[in-house]
Structure formats: structure tokens, C-alpha cells
Image (cartoon, rainbow, N blue to C red):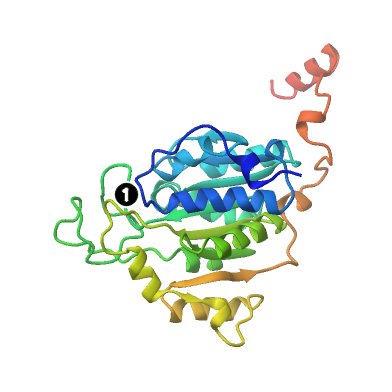
């Protein structure tokens, strides 16, 4: 059985020292080992941004996609090879700006993959501009007078879009974050996991200390029921999204694959797709 170390490779991350993405990488590696999968049974698909580099730092199948397009690639991969455990990853800019349409439709489609968003409330790779997750009044080189738009609320968006698994973690709590990713991998459907992953270089507002002072663990809220969608939405709104844990999980709704008529139990990679010249010509004729 694979261990945490089996998911390491020899590529050294070039994130800034102290970046929260280091912990996210470690949590993915630990979670993969804990659920009992092997490196060749995992694929990590990433987008563009500091967080997009993560697919190259884990010993598994990996694909570094284009900006905002990690989710279409990840979904296609899962549909072609249902035996793979597929994790898509990216930052808040990748998932909530250029890729927002893909995020919403991936959630409602409910394909059996896990999406980990490293949310630092800023554009880090391009040297510190305001992102969709930056709060109103946030001052950067792109909003020197302060952002006039409100911050996008990813948990509310996910719940409203029909997500069957919504969770949120904090990169300093690697034990909880690992457990959340494990639960996401085991969930049969689309698992949305937002992670507060502070940018130590450009975001001097949403720091580690700031999150420690403002976050609430759902486990500490008496009577919280993550199977109750209305309670999940109400709790998220009451705490302005600053909660960690499994926010909502629906174990009854079937995944996309379970709903597709005739979806083969065999991965596409194991199916003989050769056809006779006669069958090929008949297929072509249908499109003529």
C-alpha cells in the first residue's frame, strides 16, 4: 500500500517560503495515501497561477492546463477512465474568474471528481492584483483606490448550484484539510473544497493570523447538521463564509456517470475501439 512518501517526486516547489500551497500539496498526498490509492491511480489536473504548478509536484499522473480550464480537462479524463481518482486544482482567480462558468457547470453536473481551490484572495502569480475573492476596499496595484466590487462568495455559489459535497479548510490545519480531501475523494459525485491558502508575499490583509482570529470550525457549532442544505446556507451566511469543515454533503443524488445511459463499466483505455472498414464507412456516412 502506498504511503505519503510515494506521492513525492524530485521536483522542488518554487512557491514563496510560507505559502499556504505547500500544506495543500501535503494534504493531497496524505489523503491519497490514507484512502488507499496508488500513484498510478491518481491524476492531478491544474490550471494557471501559483497553485497551478501543483500538478507537477506530486508523483501521480498530472496535467498543467490553460487558465480556467482545469475542470473540463479533469471531467474528460474521468469520463474516459473511470478507474482514475481525479483531483482538479487551481486558485481563486482560475476557478472564480475566467473559469467560473466551468466551476458552476461542473458542480451541477456532479461528475465524480474532487476540486481543490487554493483561495488566497489575490492574484499572486501576476504580482498582486485584486481577484474576485478580494474584499471591497481591498487595495492593490489594480485597485489603488480600493476594490469597489464585493467579494465573490464561493460556498454560497456552490450550494446554490446544487453541489453534493461542499467543504472548506485552512492550510495551517493540515489534519482537518487532509480529512476533508479524503472525504472528497470518497464522495460519489463532485466534491468542492475551498482552502484558505494565504499569499505571504502580496496579501498583507488575509494573513495566517487574520484567519486564526476569524475562522470558526463547524465541529464547534452545537447541533450543526451537514446533511441539511438550508442549515448549511444559513450558517455560511451568518459567518460570512469564514467556516471550516464539511459544510454540506448529499449522499443520495447519483453522480453524472451513474445517470449516463450505457456508460461502460470498463474505462475507455481498456475498450477495443478498432472497427472494420465497413463500420467506419457507415459511421462516416451518417455525418455526410
The answer to whether residue 245 shows anywhere in this view is yes
Tell me if 53 is positioned left or right of 75 in this view: left
In the rendered view, tell whether residue 255 sits above or below residue 284.
Answer: below
Q: In which quadrant of the rendered image does the C terminus lie?
A: top right
Tell me if 158 is positioned left or right of 267 in this view: left
> How many numbered dots are placed on residues in this image?
1
- Front position in the image: 176 or 255: 176
**Which residue is most to the top?**
277
In the rendered view, tell whether residue 166 sits above or below residue 233.
Answer: above
For image coordinates 65% across by 55% down, the residue present is: 110
In the rendered view, tell whether residue 55 sits above or below residue 214.
Answer: above
What kind of element bears circle 1?
Answer: loop
For image coordinates 56% across by 53% down, the residue present is: 27
For image coordinates 26% across by 49% down, the residue present is: 128
Residue under label 1, please give it: 123
In the rendered view, tell whether residue 240 sits above or below residue 60.
Answer: below
Q: Where is residue 234 in the image (x, y as percent from the top left)?
A: 51, 81
Quarter occupied by residue 192: bottom right
Q: Position of residue 69 (x, y in %)?
A: 49, 40
Q: Position of residue 52 (x, y in %)?
A: 45, 41
Neighbourhood count class around disc 1 (C-alpha, 10 Å): few under 14, some 14–19, many 20 upward = many
Q: In which quadrant of the rendered image does the N terminus lie?
A: top right
- Front position in the image: 268 or 52: 52
**Which residue is most to the left?**
145
For image coordinates 74% across by 42% down, the residue present is: 82
The answer to whether residue 162 shows anywhere in this view is no
Q: Position of residue 211 (x, y in %)?
A: 38, 69
**Which residue is most to the bottom?**
222
Amino acid at each position: 500500500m502506498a504511503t505519503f512518501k510515494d506521492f513525492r517526486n524530485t521536483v522542488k516547489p518554487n512557491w514563496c517560503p510560507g505559502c499556504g500551497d505547500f500544506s495543500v500539496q501535503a494534504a493531497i498526498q496524505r489523503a491519497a495515501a490514507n484512502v488507499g490509492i496508488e500513484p498510478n491511480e491518481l491524476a492531478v489536473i491544474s490550471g494557471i497561477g501559483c497553485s497551478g504548478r501543483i500538478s507537477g509536484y506530486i508523483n501521480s499522473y498530472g496535467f498543467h492546463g490553460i487558465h480556467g480550464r482545469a475542470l473540463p480537462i479533469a471531467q474528460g479524463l474521468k469520463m474516459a477512465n473511470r478507474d482514475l481518482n481525479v483531483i482538479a486544482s487551481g486558485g481563486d482567480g482560475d476557478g472564480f474568474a475566467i473559469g467560473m462558468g466551468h466551476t458552476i457547470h461542473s458542480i451541477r453536473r456532479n461528475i465524480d471528481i474532487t476540486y481543490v481551490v487554493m483561495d488566497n484572495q489575490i492574484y499572486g502569480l501576476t504580482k498582486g492584483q485584486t481577484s474576485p475573492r478580494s474584499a471591497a476596499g481591498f487595495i492593490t496595484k489594480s485597485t489603488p483606490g480600493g476594490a469597489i466590487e464585493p467579494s465573490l462568495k464561493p460556498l454560497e455559489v456552490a450550494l446554490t448550484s446544487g453541489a453534493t459535497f461542499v467543504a472548506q479548510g485552512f492550510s495551517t490545519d493540515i489534519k482537518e484539510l487532509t480529512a476533508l480531501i479524503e472525504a472528497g475523494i470518497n464522495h460519489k459525485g463532485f466534491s468542492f473544497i475551498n482552502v484558505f491558502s494565504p499569499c505571504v508575499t502580496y496579501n498583507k490583509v488575509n494573513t495566517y493570523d487574520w484567519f486564526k482570529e476569524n475562522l470558526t470550525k463547524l465541529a464547534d457549532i452545537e447541533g450543526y447538521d451537514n446533511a441539511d442544505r438550508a442549515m448549511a446556507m444559513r450558517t455560511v451566511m451568518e459567518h460570512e463564509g469564514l467556516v471550516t469543515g464539511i459544510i454540506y454533503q448529499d449522499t443520495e443524488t447519483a453522480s453524472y456517470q451513474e445517470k449516463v445511459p450505457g456508460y461502460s463499466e470498463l474505462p475507455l483505455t481498456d475498450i477495443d475501439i478498432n472497427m472494420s472498414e465497413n463500420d467506419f464507412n457507415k459511421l462516416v456516412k451518417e455525418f455526410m
